[in-house]
Amino acid sequence: MIDDQKNQAKKKATIDDFFVPNRKETKLPKSINSAQGNDEEKVSGEAPSKVVAVPGLSLFGEFVTRTEEKEILNFLNDSTRCTWRTDLSRRTMHFGGTFCLMPRKNDVFDQAKLEIVQAPELPPELHWLVQRLIDRRVYEDGQRPQYCIVNEYTGNLGISAHTENFQFGEPVVGLSLLSGCPIRFHELAVPSNGSVRSGKAARARKTGRVADVQLPPRSLLVMNGPSRWSWQHEIVRSGKGRGPDWKRVSLTFRFKP
Protein backbone atom coordinates (compact mmCIF):
# COMPACT_ATOMS: atom_id res chain seq x y z
CA MET A 1 0.00 0.00 0.00
CA ILE A 2 2.78 2.42 0.94
CA ASP A 3 4.60 1.69 -2.33
CA ASP A 4 1.39 2.42 -4.25
CA GLN A 5 1.07 5.79 -2.48
CA LYS A 6 4.66 6.71 -3.40
CA ASN A 7 3.99 5.87 -7.05
CA GLN A 8 0.79 7.96 -7.04
CA ALA A 9 2.64 10.94 -5.51
CA LYS A 10 4.83 11.12 -8.61
CA LYS A 11 1.76 11.67 -10.81
CA LYS A 12 -0.24 14.46 -9.15
CA ALA A 13 -0.55 15.75 -5.62
CA THR A 14 -4.05 15.23 -4.26
CA ILE A 15 -5.54 15.02 -0.79
CA ASP A 16 -5.13 11.22 -0.92
CA ASP A 17 -1.39 11.63 -1.44
CA PHE A 18 -1.01 13.70 1.72
CA PHE A 19 -3.51 12.12 4.09
CA VAL A 20 -4.77 8.59 4.66
CA PRO A 21 -8.16 8.17 6.40
CA ASN A 22 -7.98 7.01 9.99
CA ARG A 23 -9.02 3.35 10.14
CA LYS A 24 -7.64 2.50 13.56
CA GLU A 25 -9.36 2.66 16.92
CA THR A 26 -8.27 5.65 18.99
CA LYS A 27 -5.69 4.73 21.60
CA LEU A 28 -5.11 7.28 24.34
CA PRO A 29 -1.67 7.74 25.85
CA LYS A 30 -1.08 5.63 28.96
CA SER A 31 -0.68 8.74 31.11
CA ILE A 32 -4.25 9.76 30.21
CA ASN A 33 -5.73 6.47 31.43
CA SER A 34 -3.69 5.88 34.57
CA ALA A 35 -1.67 7.81 37.11
CA GLN A 36 2.09 7.59 36.74
CA GLY A 37 4.26 6.93 39.77
CA ASN A 38 7.33 8.55 38.23
CA ASP A 39 7.81 12.30 38.63
CA GLU A 40 9.15 12.37 35.07
CA GLU A 41 5.69 11.29 33.87
CA LYS A 42 3.70 13.99 35.64
CA VAL A 43 2.27 16.98 33.79
CA SER A 44 3.22 20.27 35.42
CA GLY A 45 0.25 21.81 37.20
CA GLU A 46 1.90 25.20 37.52
CA ALA A 47 0.38 28.32 36.02
CA PRO A 48 2.05 29.58 32.83
CA SER A 49 4.97 31.97 33.12
CA LYS A 50 4.45 35.43 31.67
CA VAL A 51 7.06 36.52 29.14
CA VAL A 52 7.61 40.14 30.14
CA ALA A 53 9.55 41.05 26.98
CA VAL A 54 6.52 40.32 24.77
CA PRO A 55 3.15 41.57 26.07
CA GLY A 56 0.45 38.91 26.10
CA LEU A 57 2.90 35.99 25.76
CA SER A 58 3.01 33.12 28.28
CA LEU A 59 4.64 29.71 28.50
CA PHE A 60 3.55 26.45 30.17
CA GLY A 61 6.38 24.09 31.12
CA GLU A 62 5.93 20.31 30.71
CA PHE A 63 2.44 20.62 29.22
CA VAL A 64 2.66 16.94 28.17
CA THR A 65 4.66 14.05 29.62
CA ARG A 66 7.40 12.13 27.83
CA THR A 67 4.98 9.23 27.34
CA GLU A 68 2.38 11.52 25.77
CA GLU A 69 5.05 13.15 23.62
CA LYS A 70 6.01 9.72 22.29
CA GLU A 71 2.37 8.80 21.63
CA ILE A 72 1.79 12.00 19.63
CA LEU A 73 4.91 11.45 17.54
CA ASN A 74 4.06 7.79 16.93
CA PHE A 75 0.66 8.86 15.61
CA LEU A 76 2.06 11.57 13.34
CA ASN A 77 4.67 9.17 11.92
CA ASP A 78 2.21 6.31 11.36
CA SER A 79 1.87 6.20 7.56
CA THR A 80 -1.42 4.28 7.80
CA ARG A 81 -3.05 7.26 9.51
CA CYS A 82 -1.03 10.35 8.56
CA THR A 83 1.29 11.44 5.77
CA TRP A 84 3.58 14.44 5.83
CA ARG A 85 3.36 16.92 2.96
CA THR A 86 6.76 17.66 1.42
CA ASP A 87 6.26 20.59 -0.95
CA LEU A 88 8.04 22.89 1.55
CA SER A 89 11.61 22.70 2.81
CA ARG A 90 10.30 21.32 6.12
CA ARG A 91 7.75 18.54 6.54
CA THR A 92 4.29 19.73 7.53
CA MET A 93 0.84 18.35 8.23
CA HIS A 94 -2.57 20.06 8.44
CA PHE A 95 -5.76 19.23 10.29
CA GLY A 96 -8.90 21.29 9.76
CA GLY A 97 -9.79 23.72 6.96
CA THR A 98 -7.82 23.98 3.73
CA PHE A 99 -4.23 24.64 2.73
CA CYS A 100 -2.32 25.50 -0.43
CA LEU A 101 0.15 23.24 -2.15
CA MET A 102 2.96 25.61 -2.98
CA PRO A 103 4.45 26.13 -6.47
CA ARG A 104 8.11 25.37 -6.99
CA LYS A 105 10.48 27.78 -5.26
CA ASN A 106 11.54 29.45 -8.52
CA ASP A 107 7.97 30.01 -9.73
CA VAL A 108 6.46 33.48 -9.55
CA PHE A 109 3.84 33.68 -6.80
CA ASP A 110 0.55 33.39 -8.66
CA GLN A 111 -2.81 32.45 -7.18
CA ALA A 112 -3.63 30.46 -10.31
CA LYS A 113 -0.73 28.09 -9.62
CA LEU A 114 -1.83 27.27 -6.07
CA GLU A 115 -3.74 24.05 -5.49
CA ILE A 116 -6.24 24.30 -2.62
CA VAL A 117 -6.48 21.06 -0.64
CA GLN A 118 -9.08 20.11 1.96
CA ALA A 119 -7.38 18.89 5.12
CA PRO A 120 -8.95 16.23 7.33
CA GLU A 121 -10.64 17.23 10.57
CA LEU A 122 -8.71 17.22 13.82
CA PRO A 123 -8.30 13.48 14.49
CA PRO A 124 -9.60 11.62 17.57
CA GLU A 125 -5.99 10.82 18.50
CA LEU A 126 -5.51 14.51 19.39
CA HIS A 127 -8.86 15.14 21.10
CA TRP A 128 -7.38 14.48 24.55
CA LEU A 129 -4.80 17.19 23.92
CA VAL A 130 -7.49 19.68 22.90
CA GLN A 131 -9.41 18.79 26.06
CA ARG A 132 -6.32 19.54 28.14
CA LEU A 133 -6.14 22.97 26.50
CA ILE A 134 -9.71 23.50 27.72
CA ASP A 135 -9.09 22.04 31.19
CA ARG A 136 -6.02 24.26 31.71
CA ARG A 137 -8.06 27.31 30.64
CA VAL A 138 -5.88 27.99 27.61
CA TYR A 139 -9.11 28.03 25.60
CA GLU A 140 -12.68 28.44 26.81
CA ASP A 141 -15.00 25.51 26.15
CA GLY A 142 -16.81 27.52 23.48
CA GLN A 143 -13.52 28.22 21.71
CA ARG A 144 -12.24 24.71 21.06
CA PRO A 145 -9.48 24.88 18.41
CA GLN A 146 -10.54 23.26 15.14
CA TYR A 147 -7.24 23.71 13.32
CA CYS A 148 -3.76 22.30 13.85
CA ILE A 149 -0.58 22.72 11.81
CA VAL A 150 2.32 20.36 12.47
CA ASN A 151 5.85 21.41 11.49
CA GLU A 152 9.04 19.36 11.66
CA TYR A 153 12.35 21.24 11.89
CA THR A 154 15.70 19.53 11.32
CA GLY A 155 19.22 20.74 10.51
CA ASN A 156 19.16 24.50 9.93
CA LEU A 157 15.47 24.72 8.97
CA GLY A 158 13.21 27.45 10.29
CA ILE A 159 10.24 29.60 9.36
CA SER A 160 10.20 33.28 8.39
CA ALA A 161 8.76 35.99 10.61
CA HIS A 162 4.96 36.19 10.39
CA THR A 163 1.73 36.61 12.31
CA GLU A 164 -0.96 33.94 12.20
CA ASN A 165 -3.72 34.73 9.71
CA PHE A 166 -6.18 37.21 11.18
CA GLN A 167 -9.17 35.03 10.27
CA PHE A 168 -8.26 33.02 13.38
CA GLY A 169 -8.90 34.28 16.89
CA GLU A 170 -6.80 34.29 20.03
CA PRO A 171 -4.97 32.65 21.57
CA VAL A 172 -2.72 30.90 19.09
CA VAL A 173 -0.75 28.20 20.89
CA GLY A 174 2.25 26.08 19.98
CA LEU A 175 3.34 22.79 21.57
CA SER A 176 7.06 21.98 21.21
CA LEU A 177 8.19 18.35 21.09
CA LEU A 178 11.64 16.72 21.05
CA SER A 179 14.43 19.34 20.99
CA GLY A 180 14.19 22.76 22.60
CA CYS A 181 14.45 25.83 20.40
CA PRO A 182 14.43 29.64 20.64
CA ILE A 183 11.63 31.54 18.95
CA ARG A 184 12.22 35.16 17.92
CA PHE A 185 9.59 37.89 18.18
CA HIS A 186 9.61 41.16 16.20
CA GLU A 187 7.39 44.05 17.29
CA LEU A 188 5.38 45.61 14.44
CA ALA A 189 4.71 49.32 14.07
CA VAL A 190 1.10 48.41 13.28
CA PRO A 191 -0.64 45.00 13.15
CA SER A 192 -0.08 43.29 9.80
CA ASN A 193 -1.79 40.22 8.33
CA GLY A 194 0.54 39.63 5.35
CA SER A 195 1.62 36.11 4.45
CA VAL A 196 5.21 34.89 4.13
CA ARG A 197 4.80 33.50 0.60
CA SER A 198 3.36 36.75 -0.81
CA GLY A 199 6.23 38.76 0.68
CA LYS A 200 3.86 41.00 2.66
CA ALA A 201 5.10 39.66 6.00
CA ALA A 202 8.68 40.66 5.16
CA ARG A 203 7.52 44.16 4.14
CA ALA A 204 5.57 44.78 7.35
CA ARG A 205 6.95 47.80 9.25
CA LYS A 206 8.81 46.84 12.41
CA THR A 207 9.85 48.95 15.39
CA GLY A 208 13.23 47.23 15.71
CA ARG A 209 12.31 45.71 19.07
CA VAL A 210 13.25 42.00 19.12
CA ALA A 211 12.89 39.34 21.83
CA ASP A 212 14.12 35.73 21.85
CA VAL A 213 12.20 33.22 23.96
CA GLN A 214 13.47 29.71 24.69
CA LEU A 215 10.96 26.90 24.07
CA PRO A 216 11.85 23.86 26.20
CA PRO A 217 10.77 20.37 25.10
CA ARG A 218 7.08 19.63 25.83
CA SER A 219 6.33 23.29 26.60
CA LEU A 220 3.27 25.19 25.38
CA LEU A 221 3.58 28.76 24.08
CA VAL A 222 0.40 30.87 24.32
CA MET A 223 0.01 34.05 22.24
CA ASN A 224 -2.67 36.48 23.40
CA GLY A 225 -3.17 40.22 22.89
CA PRO A 226 -0.21 42.12 21.40
CA SER A 227 1.92 38.96 21.07
CA ARG A 228 -0.81 37.53 18.82
CA TRP A 229 -1.60 40.57 16.67
CA SER A 230 1.27 43.06 16.91
CA TRP A 231 4.38 40.86 17.02
CA GLN A 232 5.69 38.56 14.31
CA HIS A 233 7.35 35.31 15.35
CA GLU A 234 9.92 33.15 13.58
CA ILE A 235 12.19 30.15 14.01
CA VAL A 236 15.55 31.44 12.79
CA ARG A 237 17.16 29.37 10.05
CA SER A 238 20.45 28.41 11.66
CA GLY A 239 22.34 25.29 12.63
CA LYS A 240 23.92 27.07 15.62
CA GLY A 241 23.53 25.01 18.77
CA ARG A 242 21.89 22.15 16.88
CA GLY A 243 23.63 18.79 16.78
CA PRO A 244 23.43 16.28 13.90
CA ASP A 245 20.36 14.58 15.43
CA TRP A 246 18.56 17.79 16.37
CA LYS A 247 14.84 17.74 15.59
CA ARG A 248 11.87 19.77 16.76
CA VAL A 249 8.20 19.05 16.03
CA SER A 250 5.63 21.73 16.76
CA LEU A 251 1.84 21.58 16.86
CA THR A 252 0.16 24.96 16.38
CA PHE A 253 -3.49 25.11 17.42
CA ARG A 254 -5.91 27.81 16.21
CA PHE A 255 -9.63 28.43 16.34
CA LYS A 256 -11.89 30.45 14.11
CA PRO A 257 -14.56 32.58 15.86
Image (cartoon, rainbow, N blue to C red):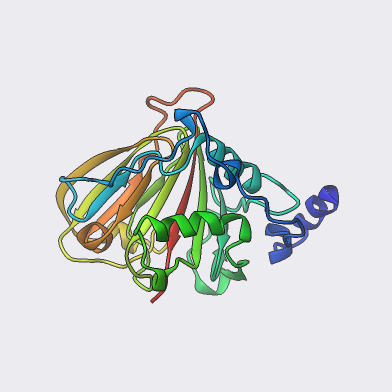
Q: Is residue 30 above or below residue 101?
A: above
| Residue name at image x 45 percent, y 36 percent | 42
Between residue 24 and residue 225, name the one nearer to us. Answer: 24
| Quadrant in which the C terminus appears | bottom left
Give the image location of residue 52, x and y in percent: 15, 46
Q: Is residue 24 above or below residue 145?
A: above
Q: Is residue 61 above or below residue 140?
A: above
| Residue name at image x 52 percent, y 23 percent | 244
Between residue 205 and residue 118, name the one nearer to us. Answer: 118
Between residue 235 and residue 180, name the one nearer to us. Answer: 180
Residue farthest along the bottom direction in this orientation: 257
Give the image location of residue 11, x and y in percent: 78, 60
| Residue name at image x 60 percent, y 67 percent | 121
Q: Residue 255: tell me if it is visible.
A: yes
Q: Residue 14: tell me if it is visible.
A: no
Give the image location of residue 189, x and y in percent: 15, 61
| Residue name at image x 61 percent, y 69 percent | 117
Left of 210 or right of it: where is 182? Answer: right
Counting the numbered discs, the total is 0
Left of 45 or right of it: where is 113? Answer: right
Give the image location of residue 2, x and y in percent: 81, 49
